Amino acid sequence: MPVIAVVDYDMGNLHSVCKGLEKAGATPHITHSAKELEMADAVVLPGVGAFDPAVQHLRARGLEQPIKDTISSGKPFLGICLGLQILFESSAEGVQPGLGIIPGKVRRFRPEAGITIPHMGWNQLEFTQRKSILWEHLPADPWVYFVHSYYVDPTDPTIRAATVTHGSQNITAAIARDNLTAVQFHPEKSSNIGLQILSNFVAQVREKIAA
């Protein structure tokens, strides 16, 4: 079974992510060791909470460069929720610089009549990269589970793999570029659809090992 390093920086529900990866046929390994990230077959960066503490914790544990090295090495990488946002350059939620791996900013939803902030609960994905490995074996416009008040706005729109509409705002729900994928929603809380997405990621890891 592929070994997937799950990055521990005190900002994520690691148990539910690990449970999802186990169900998807991988061996998750919770770690904050740069060496273990390097040795793993793939890396998952989960995250729940606020932007500034997240990047501060990552930097305090010396994980910024190892994460960048993991992505540039071609190893499969999946960011989840806050783990998507901290890949960007900056956030309206805080003052700390993000990791800057993806050009763009994290923005706050505009208040408007009839919408709740945070955007919380089930909503439908609209695929913009239908051929992304994450979406294999999924129906069109599947429902997934969101909890967030901020969303990513990539400089390059072609990196978007899916969008979601909340009120009048259509925002990025997932990105994909080469070996790097990241989602705003929580696959580990998204029932069978989420499990299929995690299984697709694990299948990508297996292909990489076999290549």
Image (cartoon, rainbow, N blue to C red):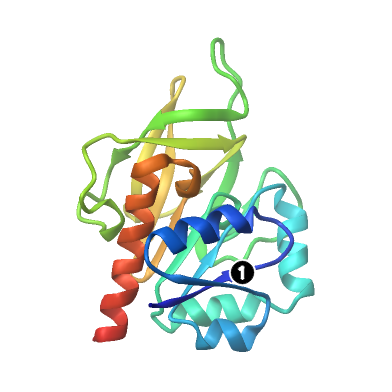
Instruction: Name the residue at 53% across, 87% down.
Output: 38
Image quadrant where residue 97 sits: bottom right
Q: Number of labelled discs? A: 1
Residue found 60% across the figure and 51% down from its top:
82
Q: Secondary structure at mark 1?
A: strand
Q: Where the N terminus falls, by quadrant?
A: bottom left
In the current view of this chain or complex, which residue is farthest to the top? Answer: 113
**Residue 36, position as x, y percentages in the image:** 59, 85
Find residue 172 and report its horizontal and vertical position in percent.
43, 42
Q: Quadrant of the C terminus?
A: bottom left
- Give whichever of 67, 31 is nearer the camera: 31
Measured as percent of width and height from the top left, residue 6 is found at: 57, 68
User: Which residue is more in the foreground, 11 or 100?
Assistant: 11
Q: Evaluate whether residue 157 shows in this view.
A: no
Image position of 91 (left or right of 141) = right
Where does residue 41 sit, x and y in percent of width and height? 43, 81
The picture quadrant where one finds residue 111 is: top right
Mark 1 packing: few (<14 Cα in 10 Å), some, or many (20+)? many
Q: Is residue 8 left or right of residue 57?
A: left
Give the amino acid type for the residue marked by disc 1 in the picture: Val
Going by the image, does 20 lie left or right of 127? Answer: right
Q: Which residue is mark 1?
A: 7
Q: Can residue 196 be spotted in the picture?
A: yes
* Residue depicted at x 25% and y 85%: 210
